[in-house]
Amino acid sequence: MSGILPLFLVSLCLIVGSVQSQSSSQDAFIIQYLERRLAQMEERLNQCEQSTTSVTQRTFDLSSEIRGYLSTLSVLRSEVKSQMDGMSVRVDRMERELEYLENKIPSQSEIEMEEALLEQQIKAAELDLLKRKAKIKVQNDCSTGLSQIKSLKIVKKAGDTYGSWFKDPSEGSAKIYLLSGIRNDTVLEYVSLQSFTERTSSPAKVVQLPFHWQGSGHVVYNGFLYYHKADTTNQIVKVDLLNGTVVDSTLLPGAGRMPVYSLNPNTYLDMAVDELGLWVIHADAEYGGNLVITKLEIGTLAVESVWDTQCRSHDAEGAFLICGTLYVVYNTRYGGRSTIQCLYDIHDTIHSNESPVMFFPKRYTSHSSIHYHPGDKQLYAWDDGYQTIYKVETRKDDQVIAD
Ligand SMILES: *[C@@H]1O[C@H](CO)[C@@H](O)[C@H](O)[C@H]1NC(C)=O
Ligand SMILES: *[C@@H]1O[C@H](CO)[C@@H](O)[C@H](O)[C@H]1NC(C)=O
């Protein structure tokens, strides 16, 4: 605008100069007019200049404002950048950690190796068990098998329909014990079989137990009674019959959830003594109701070994062991002729097909307990309230194998 202004003024002077040569009154009027116009123009010029400065000012303001924004923006950008940097460091660290963890997780082949190791350990344990079986055989020269049940003698009729009676199988003992009923806490002790059978006999001793028993699976060995404590699933207690005190007790793993024999629904743990020591027979519901035999250490009641047999508990009424072989006695629920139909030999020297079904003497029976006495080679049985004795015939299994 400043370039245009002088040009404009020059042209204006030229016009004024040319106009001066005309008449003076007319001149005065024109000069006034021009002066007015000039004043107006100057004013507008002023206004123009003012607005220009204000525009410049505003432009300046705007640019400084933009500069401010820009600096804030750059601050923000650097902040974002530093955050990004931090993030990338963390991502890096995370990646490293992931890698580390991946290295720590065992690969498939390593897992397979561990399984193989486990299998090896199981095999070793099985071998250990076999060795233990072998040791039992070596320690006890015991290879006697049952060949037949020869004769029956009815000794007495005493007590309830259900119960158990037996002679202490420890060497040199002649004592007879009677436990009548399926739940009681009184044990009758007689000095001998003769004393027991005498018509007017009274027990030499009445022992009061600290806890009731349950069922009819008890045994006595060397003056100690081993029995299933009533109202427990699987507790076996060992009581000193001299003064009726508990010496030891144990819980038999996995036992006590079903009756051992389906024909004797009140007996959950059936104990037995043979040439090798103390046994417990129970039925395992998880094992198809088949019988399981457990060898217990007679002093401490510790479990020595466990064998799952293929013998059924269904229709069984009792069982006993001779030299580590289980003989299971079956009957019908109406009472009939008892038979041995299943046997299980822990040494695997006798096989079921070698031993045919063995019959008990011809008589209708219903056994609530059968106890073998290794010294006498006799079975002490409780038959529907009668105390009976079966003589059994045994043979050397070695000879059978040699044949
Ligand atoms: C417990 O046994 C004793 C002796 O055999 C007997 O007298 C008593 O009646 C029995 N108690 C019960 C509750 O059966
Ligand atoms: C019970 O008898 C045994 C053997 O005589 C003895 O060791 C034990 O201390 C007796 N217990 C009590 C409580 O009398």
Image: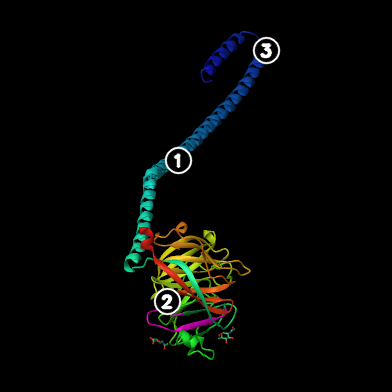
In the depicted structure, whether residue 351 falls above or below residue 236: above
Q: Is residue 74 left or right of residue 185?
A: left
Instruction: Give the image quarter of residue 50.
Output: top right
Q: Which mark is residue 226?
A: none
Distance (Cα) linking label 1 and label 2? 98 Å
Circle 1 — which element?
helix
Secondary structure mostly seen in the magenta stretch: loop
- Residue depicted at 50% across the width and 33% down the height: 63
Q: Residues within 10 Å of mark 3 (few under 14, many from 20)?
A: few
Of circles 1 and 2, the one toward us is 2
Indicate the amino acid at tag 3: Gln
Does dot 3 land on a helix, a strand or a loop? helix
Of circles 1 and 3, the one toward us is: 1
Left or right of 201 in this view: 130: left
* Mark toward the start of the polypeptide (2 vs 3): 3
Residue 295, percent across and down? 42, 68
- The earlier-in-sequence mark between 1 and 2 is 1
Which residues fall within the magenta stretch? 167-181
Does residue 375 appear in the picture of this structure?
Answer: yes
Q: Please state which of residues 208 and 388 is positioned toward the viewer in this rendering.
A: 388
Viewer-closest of 317 and 114: 317
Residue 334 in the image: state x and y as whole percent.
Answer: 63, 69
Circle 1 residues within 10 Å: few <14, some 14–19, many ≥20: few
In the picture, the disc for residue 80 is 1
- Tell me which image quadrant ligand 2 sits in: bottom left
Residue 26: mark? 3
Camera-side mark, 2 or 3: 2
- In the rendered image, residue 325, in percent from the top left (x then y), is placed at 43, 65
User: Tag on residue 376?
Assistant: 2
Are the residues flagged by discs 1 and 3 in contact, CB closer than 8 Å? no
The amino acid type, in three-letter code, at marker 1 is Val
